[in-house]
Amino acid sequence: MINLKEGFHVEDNNEDSKNGWTSRRALSGILLGGSLGAIGSAAAKESSPPKSVQELHDQLAIAQLIYRYGEAADNLDAKAMDDCFASNGVLMMGPTSKLEGKFAEKMFENVHSKYACTMHNVQSHVYTVTKDTASGWSYSIASHVKKDGGSYIGQDHYIRYDDELVREGNKWRFLKRKLQTLFTKIAPVTFIAQPESRGEK
């Protein structure tokens, strides 16, 4: 009997084996065992273990932060918007406009008066976490509807956000969020219903 480290066993009772010679059958077993071991090692490398539970948790929490930002904007919820940012958080809207501190209520006054409805649709996003900080980007289509006489005009803004984030306590928040509108599409829209959760007018 030949015992391989991988646990592969080959029994051969012919005279050659008894005399210390390795038979073809035993050699095949050795080669086959080696091949299976190599394949197993390669497969293990290919199917590397999933990310740590903490990293998965962080990625999910950051995704939820992006969604909450859009929800707060659409609902004109200043408290929820301010909660998305760190205490020293900054929102850059273009090269010159910079909002910091508890800015959401002031920002929403302008949105409130200009638009009948907004809808933020988050697209792709990629973030890298390093301990208690993170950085990355996301794309969003922000649809804004404004009244124009007796009709409504829709403006779809295609936006890229470049973000720096920080973990405060057990929550991820924006430390710096830079908004860049890449292009805009304008077209008439027909209002069927307004979101009931939007701020009072």
Image (cartoon, grey):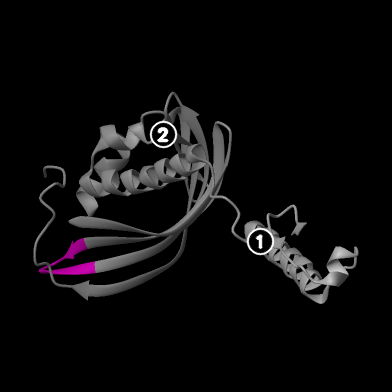
Task: Please state if 148 lies on the left or on the right of 155 as rendered.
Answer: left
Residue at image coords 84%, 67%: 17
Q: Residue at x 54, y 49 (%)?
A: 136
Is any part of residue 155 visible from this angle?
Answer: yes
Q: Is residue 160 visible?
A: no
| Disc ID at residue 85 | 2
Counting labels gives 2
Residue 134 is situated, as x and y percent measured from the top left of the image, at 55, 40
Q: Residues within 10 Å of mark 1 (few under 14, many from 20)?
A: few
Quadrant showing the C terminus: top left
Q: Residue furthest front?
A: 15
Instruction: Look at the image and give the residue range highlighted in magenta.
Output: 146-153
Residue at 22% over, 62% down: 145
Left or right for 27, reference 139: right
Decide: is 149 above or below 200.
below
Q: Label 2 near label 1: C-beta < 8 Å?
A: no
State yes or no: residue 92 in magenta. Answer: no
Which mark, residue 40? 1
Q: Quadrant of residue 147?
A: bottom left
Task: Mark 1 or mark 2: name the one nearer the start of the chain.
Answer: 1
Q: Magenta stretch: residue 150 in it?
A: yes
Where is residue 59? Give x, y as percent: 46, 45
Above or below: residue 95 compared with residue 31: above
Between the C-alphas of marks 1 and 2, the distance is 47 Å
Q: Is residue 30 left or right of residue 109?
A: right
Query: Left or right: where does residue 4 sit relative to residue 108?
Result: right
- Taking depth in this image into account, of 33 and 95 the one nearest to the observer is 33
The image quadrant where one finds the N terminus is bottom right
The three-letter amino acid code for the residue at tag 2 is Phe
